[in-house]
Amino acid sequence: MKKKRKSINYGKWGYIFILPFFLTFFIFSLIPLADTIRYSFFEYYRSGIKEVGPRFVGIENYVNLLQSDMIRYAGNTLILWIIGFVPQIVIALLLASWFSDMRLKIHGKQFFKVVVYLPNLIMASAFALLFFTMFSTNGPINSILISMGAIREPIDFMGSVFGTRTIVGFMNFLMWFGNTTIMLMAAIMGISIDIFEATDLDGCSRTQRFFYVTLPLIKPILAYTVITAIIGGLQMFDVPQILTNGQGNPDRTSMTLIMFLNNHLKSKNYGMAGTLSVYLFFLSGILCFIVFKMTNKNDPDVSKAVIKSKKKEQRRRG
């Protein structure tokens, strides 16, 4: 009589392999997140050596934060993000379409990819210190402009709202457009070459092909890029923090939400810091949901249309 072979359950090994991730996530992410939400309902701060709280105050922290300068700092964050992101996505789409166009026959693509991506490897602190030195009143930019006769007196770039915001936005653009370019290139190169050949046979121009073929087909990656950029914009901290020495000068017009959060943490006001973190969490979730809905409004691969037509056919037959 043949012995029955014992069946091996391979499914359990999958759970065993992913268990370390869930343990790490639970300890270092989920518990701190729950604790942050808990602190947001408590008055908990330190004044010198005196510790006040934690004392339950309900939604009082949320109301007080709305009556503070949070809305103003949210506006600052939005403006700085727009200044950096709009040119970033435009230049990245342009470069990605050029580098992935086989008809242009661009030589040395790998070299250009490396050059484009290099600023992303530089630490934000080093980048901020570099620009602070370059655009200071005694910096090389002013020296060059004076020697050329373009200006008579040094320009105080950091002393004007327009100058500070432009520099912060330009730095964010330089640091991240390379990463965006590489991602969009990968998305475009994933499109079947047959589709582009079909557009050529139909007599489509490059502009028509880009707007009516390329953009709709890279919508998923484009949505991912915008969502990650929104999250990164809400977390904007290091560049304006170093550039303005944490003051958000001039007149707190470059103070971001995370800099505001950092001020609460420095003053050991953990209740308000937790409340602001919860606001940021829900704000990022709402913005990402809006972007996701906007970018997935149309279905370029017509999969939804096929599913709907199949359901209609089944109902008709039934």
Image (tube, helix red, strand yellow):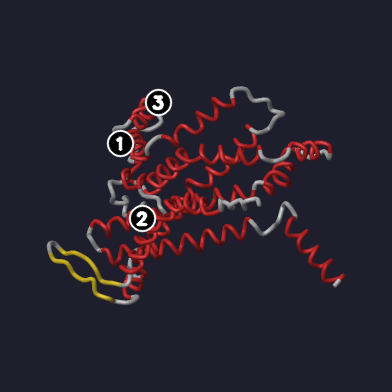
Q: Considering depth in this image, is 96 or 37 the residue closer to the camera?
A: 37
**Mark 2 — residue?**
28
**Above-or-below relation of 21 to 31:** above
Residue 111: image x %, image y %?
54, 25
Which residue is outermost to the top?
107
Task: Look at the numbered disc 3 and give the secondary structure of its residue.
Answer: loop
Tell me the tag on residue 137.
Answer: 1
Dot 3 or dot 1: first in sequence order is 1
Residue 88: image x %, image y %?
52, 42
**Above-or-below relation of 249 to 193:** below
Task: Look at the numbered disc 2 and give the secondary structure of its residue.
Answer: helix
In the image, which is nearer the foreground, mark 1 or mark 2?
Answer: 2
Amino acid tagged 3: Met
Residue 38: image x %, image y %?
33, 69
Q: Are marks 3 and 2 in contact (CB under 8 Å)?
A: no
Q: Considering depth in this image, is 303 or 139 the residue closer to the camera?
A: 303
CA–CA distance in space, label 3 to label 2: 55 Å
Residue 262: image x %, image y %?
30, 55
Quarter of the image where one finds residue 198: top right
Packing grade of label 1 (10 A; few <14, some 14-19, many >=20) is some
Task: Look at the numbered disc 1 and give the secondary structure of its residue.
Answer: loop
CA–CA distance in space, label 1 to label 2: 44 Å
Dot 1 or dot 2: first in sequence order is 2
